[in-house]
Image (tube, helix red, strand yellow):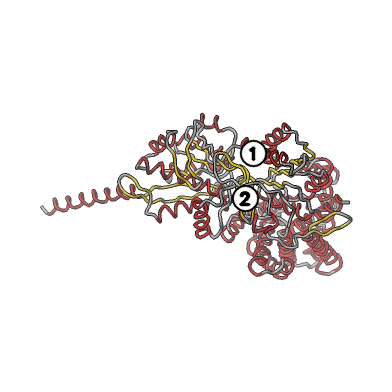
Amino acid sequence: MFILITGLLLGGTYALIALGLNLQYGVARIMNLANGELLVAGGFAAFWAYTAAQVSPVAALVLVAPIAFVLNWLIYRIMLQPLVSRAKSRGALEVDSILATFGMSFALVGIMTALFGGGYFNYAYLAQPVDIFGSSYGQNRLVAFVLAAIIGLGLWLWLSYTRAGLRLRALAVNPSSARLVGIDTRAASALAFGLGGAVTAVGGALISMFFTLDASVGILFTMKALIIVIMGGVGDIRGTIVAAMILGICETAVARLIDPGLTLAAAYVLFLGVLLFRPQGLFGKKPT
Amino acid sequence: MLRRTLMTATATLALAIAGLGAASAQETIRLGAAAPQSGPLAGGAAVTHWPAVRLWVHQTNEAGGLQLANGKAMIELVEYDDQTNPQQAIQAAQRLATQDQVDFMVSPYSTGLNLAAAPIFAQLGYPQITGTAVTNQQPELAAQFPNMFFLLGRTGVMAEDTARVLVELREAGSIGNRVALVNVADAFGIEMLGISKAVLQDAGFEIVYESSYPLGTQDLAPIIDGAKSAEADAFIAWSYPGDTFALTDQAIVQGFAPSVFFTAVATAFPGYAARFGDQIEGVMGMGGVNADDPAFKAFVEAHTALAGQGPDFWASAATYATLEVLGQAIEAVGSADRAAVLTHLQDRANSYETILGPVNFNENNDNERYWTVGQWQNGVFRGVAARGRDGAVDVQLFDGWN
């Protein structure tokens, strides 16, 4: 039971890390290597709100999310739109966006170091235990899990049952055909990118409740997010959530039953398995 | 006639300018520093390394500079970010020596980066007085790089003393026989685990839980759960900052309170106390200081005033002391003559007064006086075990998370 709950909580954390990237990569077709830095920026914002103004990280989301959305929307419009317009193929866009966002990740690390210094950041919010079936878990992790579930479910419902969501899904399936049926792909891509950024920043704000962050730690989150998104299937929210949960439970089980040193190995074995047997990801559609 | 006067005047002027240049070159000593400002160790360097270096330069200049034979010399600090990358650390040292032509260099931050930079420091002929390198290879290193000096300690001694604290507690009847040992899976964690495990097993302790976790892991609930299920009396973690925080956090959440709770790097950071408050009363960690020493208290005050944050209770003071040693060696020589300063440092008869207390180097270029184990007591991380240093206080039993 301990393994299952700890694994689910960890999976919730992973979902928060990866959901935003899925929107950005799956829908807006931008392989955003600065994803982790945006996450850390969200964490810093929550840290700052909590220590400077005693605003709880959960309440800070009300501000973090829209600010991150606007910033990411602007980044897409100003920096990435030109790359999209000139790209001749999806491959070319991928290479360009990887290079551009890789550069952006360095710039963001620099900005955050300048603003906050290079030190470690953490704070104690809801760091008390809560008992479930006889074992104790951090309240902050539980809160993060619940919010991850709400965000994941909300995104899925929105994508599945609204018109705007339909547009994004059409874009995810085939950008050029989406334009043929009258979808403004530019606006929809910018929306997806901005939304992805907002989700990532929200994830960062929630994760900062129990993770020690510093300006340079973003790349670790990017790597994790990448694995989860590819594993779950690019452009599918359900896939990301399921992959995050599987990874969380698998890592926890290996750590508790075999050896904590093997968690990374377990994660990559799982990843390799998915790549070998379902290269399109758990929920991805086979290319036609 | 006019022409000659003009020429003489020009020549005099040129000479005067040249002379001025020579004089001003004497009046400043350029000090180069390359250490992490980004990358995985930037967080630690921002606590331990940079503020201490800047503080020494600031204080030395406030006092009018270093006293040389021909007057006072101000210090000019040239900083580079080595990105926590050994290759960058080497390039930065090279650049500092050749492009910036600094007179002296601050040693890099962390064991790994110091070892990486050692060959280039030796090749360029710069003294490398380390305040953040903990290693067991000091004899070999000193033989290979006679310009390398050590202030912080040796892994073997640190691990041994930690184990010995447990032995003493058990002899006093305060703790039982069951130990949980965990480590971060990198060179530091593996080495420390090996040494402490051997000492503990020789002393008849039972290792009831042992595991390692990958570098950068912060989801450590399974480890705490494992140690808790094993009913360990003592928990020893050879951990790095991120995991030190995460392990403590999880132990509090799961109510895991053995009689000894030890985490390694960052336990002595002021941020650790800021994060956990008075819950950490009795937690032990690596290093320590004589917190009641007036010199250390003055250091804390100046550090806080300049950097807006306190020093850590271990390597901050050692980093500061490396520059005190360097400064005193320069003053003793009376010039910024690098070779002469190095010779002075290599003369084992010389000793230096630092905030750590007196420092001198043995045949392995090692100052054999260091703090090995510390403990949070009343909001201060006090040294409870040391080699050759006074002021160690008695160990207290950890009585749970308050």
Q: Are marks 2 and 1 on the same chain?
A: yes
| Residue A175 visible in the shown view | no
Which residue in the protein does label 2 denote?
B268
**What's the residue at 34%, 50% (across, down)?**
B72
Q: Return the x and y of residue A13 as percentages of the image width and height.
A: 77, 56
Task: Check the residue under mark 2 and report the chain it is in.
Answer: B
**Amino acid type of the residue tagged 2 in the rendering:** Ala
Which residue in the protein does label 1 denote?
B161
Q: Which numbered mark, 2 or 1, is in the foreground of this view?
A: 1
Q: Secondary structure at mark 1?
A: helix
Nearer to us in this view, A134 or A282: A134
Q: Return the x and y of residue B232 as percentages of the image width and height.
A: 78, 43
As drawn, the label of residue A226 is: none
Which quadrant would the C terminus of chain B be assigned to in this image?
bottom right
**What's the residue at 57%, 39% (across, down)?**
B387
Q: Quadrant of residue A103?
A: bottom right
Nearer to us in this view, B233 or A82: B233
**Amino acid type of the residue tagged 1 in the rendering:** Asp
Task: Check the residue under mark 1 and report the chain it is in.
Answer: B
- Where B282 falls versus A53 (above or below)? above
Q: Are marks 2 and 1 in contact (CB under 8 Å)?
A: no
In this rendering, the count of numbered labels is 2
Q: Return the x and y of residue A266 as percentages of the image width and height.
A: 80, 43
Q: Is residue B149 left or right of residue A208?
A: left
Q: What's the distance in space between the residues labelled 2 and 1, CA to CA?
A: 16 Å
